[in-house]
Image (cartoon, rainbow, N blue to C red):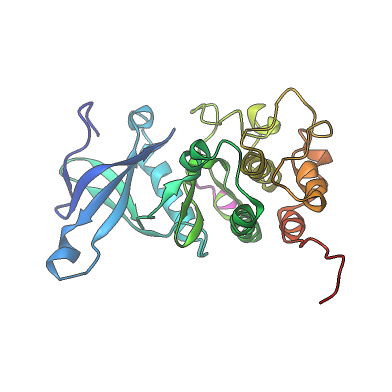
Amino acid sequence: MNSAAGPPKLLAGRYQLERILGTGGMGVVYRARDLLHEAFGEPDCRVALKLLGDSLCACADAHVLLYSEFALTRSLQHDHLVRAFSFEVDTAQQVAFFTMEVMPGLTLDRMLAQRPQGLAWHELQPMALQLLDALVYIQRQGVAHGDVKPTNIMVGEQGVRLFDFGLGHAEAQARAGLPGLSRSRLNAWTPAYAAPELMAGGLPSASADLYGAACVLYELAEGRRPDERQSNLRLPRPRQLPRQCWPPLRAALAPDPEQRTVCAAELREGMAEQRRRWFIG
């Protein structure tokens, strides 16, 4: 198990930990060098490496839960999702981990901190479409991400990448009886982006992911989060959002899942709308 001083600097005899890239409710992600690939002359031997966080290390089945996250991530192949590589166990040091691609860029929360007025539509629209493309894809695979928020979205030269399926839910895994992470074991939801039904103890779902994505898009267009005290019908249209894109986004922000009358594909279609030109030519 990981000690209070942190994990060993070298895992499985080949992964040299360099620095922490991020932390979450379930784990810690490090940037690491793959010394085996480096020895064979690979031009880029960097990987991201995820280990269990301190809050889960004491759980008897924690390593199984980590593997479940890895298996879910590995099963998804999309340009706007992180790619997982391998699951490994350093038996000598009793540390389980999995490796994935290093995503250059910065997380969306850091970008938002630099853009308090929101993003201009020509910047915002491609990011919105890429995020929604990823959601449409995972929903078609029977997967719910469970934790769509700015800290789990990377923005770089290759566009948007959604990552961290630690709270994800897959229909196939549930049918197979594989373990999952319940809110009763880890209070991990972020209230500003979590759908009300998640906060009430419900399972991750396509509708809850849509709500989280809608909160992210609202913040991108307005520079601040939706006011939790206002109903979605009373929210003002974000300043950077074209008028014709507001109805589907407002519907996705409905606190009551029964009133979210759009799906991710329909919201994507709404975000793809172009302004109508009043002239021809």
Q: Position of residue 268 (x, y in %)?
A: 71, 57
Residue 187 appears at what percent x and percent y? 52, 26
What percent of the width, then of the height, locates residue 8?
Answer: 17, 39
Q: Is residue 195 left or right of residue 55?
A: right
User: For the point 23% across and 26% down, which residue is it?
Assistant: 4
Whether residue 48 appears in this view of the structure is yes
Image quadrant holding the C terminus, namely bottom right
Q: Main secondary structure of the magenta part?
A: loop
Most extreme residue toward the top, as rendered? 229
In which quarter of the view is residue 194 placed? Answer: top right
162 to the left or right of 231:
left
In this figure, what is the number of numbered marks?
Answer: 0
Frontmost residue, 142 versus 264: 264
Q: Residue furthest bottom?
A: 281
The answer to whether residue 180 shows anywhere in this view is no
Q: Is residue 12 above or below residue 199?
A: below
The residue nearer to you, when weighing 48 against 106, is 106
In which quadrant of the rendered image does the N terminus lie?
A: top left
Name the residue: 60% across, 57% down. Answer: 138
271 vs 87, nearest the viewer: 271
Decide whether residue 166 is among the magenta residues: no
Q: Is residue 132 left or right of residue 158?
A: right
Q: Position of residue 212 (x, y in %)?
A: 64, 41
Q: Is residue 136 left or right of residue 160?
A: right
Query: Is residue 176 a member of the stretch shown in magenta?
Result: yes
Q: Which residues are magenta?
A: 174-179
